[in-house]
Image (cartoon, rainbow, N blue to C red):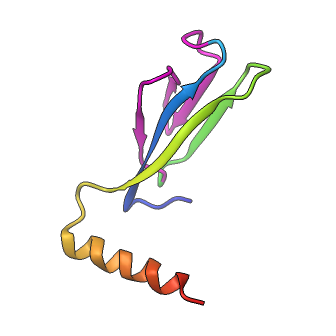
Amino acid sequence: DFTNFVLTSHLPLVIPSNGQNKCRLSVGDETRQWIEGKVILFDTSIYHDAINESDEMRYILMFRVWHPDLTKEEREALQLIYDCLEIP
């Protein structure tokens, strides 16, 4: 999606082999393993990749938040654009 006006958050809910580095998220040059209950917040405008080396599904609650450097006016303008795109 490569957008930098929002940050993406992953809250790992069920991670196979939790803590054994089998499920990871790489963002740019940095790689972190998912640990159940520990949030990872990252900028999707940077190349990112998810790795699951287990034979089981991982479950992550993903949500997005506005980038903290945006002003109120910028957030409102971006929201207006999204609202207009949703109207048929």
User: What residue do we see at 54% from left, 11% from top?
Assistant: 19
> What's drawn in magenta, residue-wise?
18-44
Which quarter of the image is occupied by the C terminus? bottom right
User: What residue do we see at 28% from left, 76% from top?
Assistant: 76
Residue 47 at x, y = what percent? 54, 47
Q: How many marks?
A: 0
Q: Extreme right residue here?
A: 55
Using residue 67 as the reference point, say whether residue 60 is left or right of it: right
Residue 81 magenta = no
Using residue 67 as the reference point, say whether residue 54 is left or right of it: right
Using residue 66 as the reference point, say whether residue 36 is left or right of it: right
Residue 13 at x, y = what percent? 54, 28
User: What residue do we see at 31% from left, 56% from top?
Assistant: 67
User: What residue do we see at 44% from left, 24% from top?
Assistant: 37
Image position of 31 with respect to 86: above or below: above
Which of 17/4 is in front?
17
Residue 62 at x, y = what percent? 51, 44
